[in-house]
Amino acid sequence: MREKMPCLNAESLSSLPDQRGSRGEKKAKGGEKGAILERKEQKVIASAGWLRSPLRAPVVKTQRLGFRMGKESEKVRTWLDDCSDSARSYFSRSSRSLMNGCVEKAQAAQNLITDPRSRRTSLDLRRKSHPMCGLSQTSMESSTTERPHSCLPVFHRIDSLDQDKSHCPQTLDVPISLSVSRWKCSNCLSSPRCTGDDACNFMMKLFGDLFGPTQEENIYFQVLQHLCEVTHAQRCLISMTTMDRAGEKCLGPVFQSDGESVYNNQQTEWVKCIMGYVVSTGRPLILRDVHESSTIQSELYGREEYIPKGVLSLPVLNHKNEVIGVVMAVNKTRTGSREVVSFSQQDEKVLSSHMTFLGLILENSQLFRSSEQEGKRNQTTPEGTDRFVVSQKPFSRMVRTEHNKSNFSVHSATRKCDIYDLSYIHALHVQNSMETLNIVNHMAQTSKISEIRSLISTPLRDRQEDNLLGVCHLVNKTSALNETQAFSRAEEHLLEDFAVFCALGLQKFNSQQTVDETRARLAVTTEVLSYQISASQEKPEDLEEPAIPSSDTLCLRDFGFSDFSLSQAAMTQAVVRMFLDLNLPQEFSIDYKALCQWVLSVQKCYRSNVVYHNWSHALRTAQCMFAMMQTDEFKNNFSSMEVLALMIASLCHDLDHRGVNNSYVVRSNQPLSQLYGQSSLEHHHYDMCLLILNNPGSQILSSLSVNKYKACVQMIEKNILATDLAIYIEKRAKFFKLVQSDCCLWKDEGHRELLRSMLMTASDICAITKPWPVQKRIAELVATEFYAQGDREKWEFNIQPIGVMDRENCSRLPQMQVDYIDGICAPLYEALASVCESCSPLKDGCGNNRKHWQHLVDSKMKD
């Protein structure tokens, strides 16, 4: 069981005297010559930096080349799994080559350290570049401060480099007798004792034998025995750091040597305190005496059978200079006797040099173990598990997988949850607690409950919404002798990790199911809408081709056309006549019955309760476009495809209009604004146009090829969007500039598109060009619709509408019409008359109506 680190002397850290400032002052006094020497040697020491893992180089390279991302990651990982022997051999050869260079650098660094002429400077530099592995820098006397009861009195050795080389930490003369005998490391019998001045042959050999299924306990055994040998310690301890469930760093199991073997030792208070302090600070620690403070000593060591006298502890670092473990040597004995003496500077230096290789060895061992664990995690359940169950919230169904050991078969089934099933009961418990449940040897009265002898249950969480998706169970772990066993903590973590992937799978399934349901509802809605907008399949008699009046009879070529005297049947006849006169059915092989069905469907999609933006407005817009297409300038320069797109867009440009503008749609947060954003109504009109064009029976573009169909639809979309006055105001400056410069608009596709947009706006607002009685009546219809929207804005939003929509400004209608003509209409029709002289009636009609409105304004001012 892992335990969190005890209090790590956080309060005492602030009270430690800082010796670095005084040493910095001494260096400053050393003069310029000493500074130059220090910088020169610093270059050499910098090359003896922390040794990096040989396994790190391929990983970094693959990351830089883009591996471990997407499908390439899976290919690399699969190849490494299939060719593990080749990969291990490659990493072994690469690491040996790397280590040869690292050893040469380490030897150069150690020679500088042991050189008496450069001893002071090199040690200072060593402390700056590697404070974790060098000699301790700080000192604290026993009387400095009191510490919490969970922490022992900590003493850092005074690292005064001006003192004699034989300076050693002091210890109290308290006799301690231990039964641990001295031994010789079997791996070092053929080599002299490590002095820290050269590379350790034992550590090099251990590192070379690392690439294989080596147990960590075996590594601990060899390393601890070797450290006991080189430091003359009665025993050595090692512990690796790990993360608890809260994500905090804590100490793992403590292993210690007893002369013949290494075993997992229960963490005692003084061991936890010393190791915890080294892990938290990342600095070496020497304890000279543990009996100085009797109060803390009695509380820390009072219940301990074994009380240390001298302790040397150093951190184990990885290639990122992160603490991954801690090593501690206890009670150094004099050679040839059992007398306990203090650890010396040489002991710390030797142990520090071993920590470099030890960090490398342990990190690579952890990498190898992690790769094996990842392979095991790919298995669905641990070996020996009878049943694997996933219950989905609200536990309406259960997916159950059973493993039959007799014939090695696996059976999976999905069934409804039974409230009397123990799995359902445990699922409810996990749902309420949202924590992993681990039980064993649960016996009950009923036969159903007695089926479960051991169980792990963990929640399946939705990480985005932090709610429960379901519960995952592992049931009945058995041994080789078919005996019930409890699930271990490692298997709990395995199930929790698997639950993450299981939750992601369920979340994806639920999302896909929601998408499928939404798509199905959309298909049903589209089908219903298509039926509602479809006109009768029987062709009316008044749409028979011989019964349709001519263009001259309906005055379709006249810019002063008015639909007020036409019936509904005559209006549909007028639309069909315009398509026939433009020769569009013959040009694009449009079936005449489909054309009639399309016209009737378009008429049906205009709302009859809208005062102005209705079928009559659509007919007036299409008639104005038809009249312009009959002029020589446009007839000779526009292609048949462009004419078809303009006629379809002009008739459909306000489909399903609601009698409000885009500003109201956005302010009321209607679904149209959420779906389209800008130009919401125009985008909706275009979508309705496509819906009718693709509706069975109304497919007038079915004879077009794929490319021509796409081109035609794109032109229709741009033409309909151009009826938004905001887009017109944005584009018209460029159009007016082209007209004034007398540039040819017919050779450039961009110019042609701009001209089509201007023609759509001119047709949309053509009511301002009609004869005065017609124009006045249409203006009153527009004002009525605007006032209705203004009333809704006052009622729903409690705001003051703009002037043209405020009913209280109805008396100012003539002035607002004059402003509308001057700002929007007159400049456009003047530019079109410059491009096409045949469009001059539009300009003249607009000018005449302005005079009438201005006359009303003047008359009212006189009154």
Image (cartoon, grey):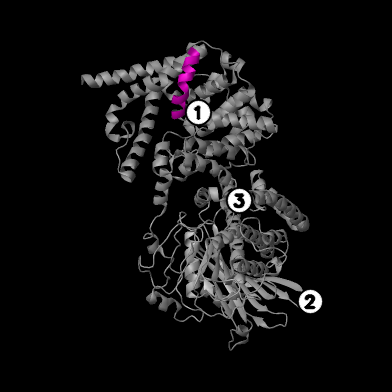
Q: Position of residue 118 (x, y in %)?
A: 54, 48
Is 736 within the magenta? yes
Q: Residues within 10 Å of mark 3 (few under 14, many from 20)?
A: some
According to the picture, the residue beneath numbered tag 3 turns out to be 111
Going from N to C along the chain, the mark reached first, 2 or 1, is 2
Q: Is residue 812 above or below residue 249?
A: above
Amino acid marked by disc 3? Asn
The stretch of residues the image draws in magenta is 726-739
Q: Position of residue 120 (x, y in %)?
A: 50, 50
Question: Mark 1: which secondary structure?
Answer: loop
According to the picture, the residue beneath numbered tag 1 turns out to be 722
Q: Is residue 29 above or below residue 570?
A: below
Q: Nearer the viewer, mark 3 or mark 2?
A: 3
Asked if residue 11 lies left or right of residue 508, the reply is left
Any part of residue 640 in sight: yes
Q: Residue furthest bottom?
A: 445
